[in-house]
Structure formats: C-alpha cells, structure tokens
Image (tube, helix red, strand yellow):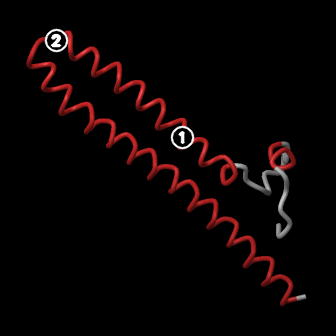
Amino acid sequence: MNQRKSFFEALFDFSFSSFIATKVIGILYIISIVISSIVCLFLLLGSFNSGIGGVFAGLIGVPLLWIFNVIISRLSLESLIASIKTSENTARVAEMMQNQNS
C-alpha cells in the first residue's frame, strides 16, 4: 500500500488496492466546468429568443446556475477525494497496527 503505482498500473489493478481518482480529479473538474459552461451558454442563447423577460431571466439565472453547478461539482469531487484519502489512511493505520502486533 505504501508504494505508488503509475497511472496505468493503477488503472489495471483488478484488486482496486490503489485509486486513480486522485490522479485524474483535476481533469474531471475541468471537464465539469467546460460542460457546465457549454450548457449555460446554450441556455443563455435560448433565453434571448424568449423576449425581454427571458433575457433578464437568462442574464440573472444562467450565471447563478453556472456557479451552483461548479460548486456542486467541486463539493462532489472533494467528497470523493476525502473518502479515498480516508480509505488510504485507514489502510496505512491497519498496516502499522499489524506490524506492531507481529
């Protein structure tokens, strides 16, 4: 557990003893921001076809929706990383306890 595996070693680790999420989490965050931006851009452009009320709703609602999506994405990814770190630390503590008892 103490040794670090390369990305491809971790990817094809069928025992799931190492995690790749910690290696790709930044890319996943960028992808989620890009997808949220594209969706919100289409929503904003669609709101321009809805008349003056839709334009105001789009100019106020779409940026709020974008910020909400980015916050939820970030919190979800941080929660994933926190649970992975907890698992890694628990395995490390269990290994240390086992070494002390031996």
Q: Earlier in the sequence, mark 2 or mark 1?
A: 1
Locate the N terminus by quadrant.
bottom right
Q: Residue at x 74, y 70 (%)?
A: 91
Give the vertical position of 93 relative to 27 (above or below).
Answer: below
Neighbor class of circle 2 (other Cα within 10 Å; few <14, some 14-19, many 20+) is few
Q: Residue 66: image x %, image y %?
A: 33, 36
Give the side of residue 50 with respect to residue 77, left or right: left
* Type of amino acid under label 1: Ile
- Badge 2 marks a residue whose secondary structure is helix
Give the side of residue 56 with respect to residue 82, left or right: left
Neighbor class of circle 1 (other Cα within 10 Å; few <14, some 14-19, many 20+) is few
Give the side of residue 53 with respect to residue 3, left or right: left
Q: Residue at x 85, y 48 (%)?
A: 13
Q: Which residue is mark 1?
A: 30
* Type of amino acid under label 2: Ser
Q: Residue 71: image x %, image y %?
A: 38, 48
- Of residue 77 and residue 14, the one placed in the foreground of this image is 77
Give the vertical position of 14 relative to 65 (above or below).
Answer: below
Locate the C terminus by quadrant.
bottom right
Q: Residue at x 32, y 42 (%)?
A: 67
- Of residue 3 and residue 67, the one placed in the foreground of this image is 67
Q: Residue 35: image x %, image y %?
A: 47, 29
Q: Residue 87: image x %, image y %?
A: 66, 65
* Alpha carbon distance from label 2 to label 1: 31 Å
Q: Quadrant of residue 73?
A: top left
Give the vertical position of 55 relative to 50 (above or below).
Answer: below
- Badge 1 marks a residue whose secondary structure is helix
Q: Which residue is mark 2?
A: 50
**The label number, if any, that marks residue 61 in the structure image:** none
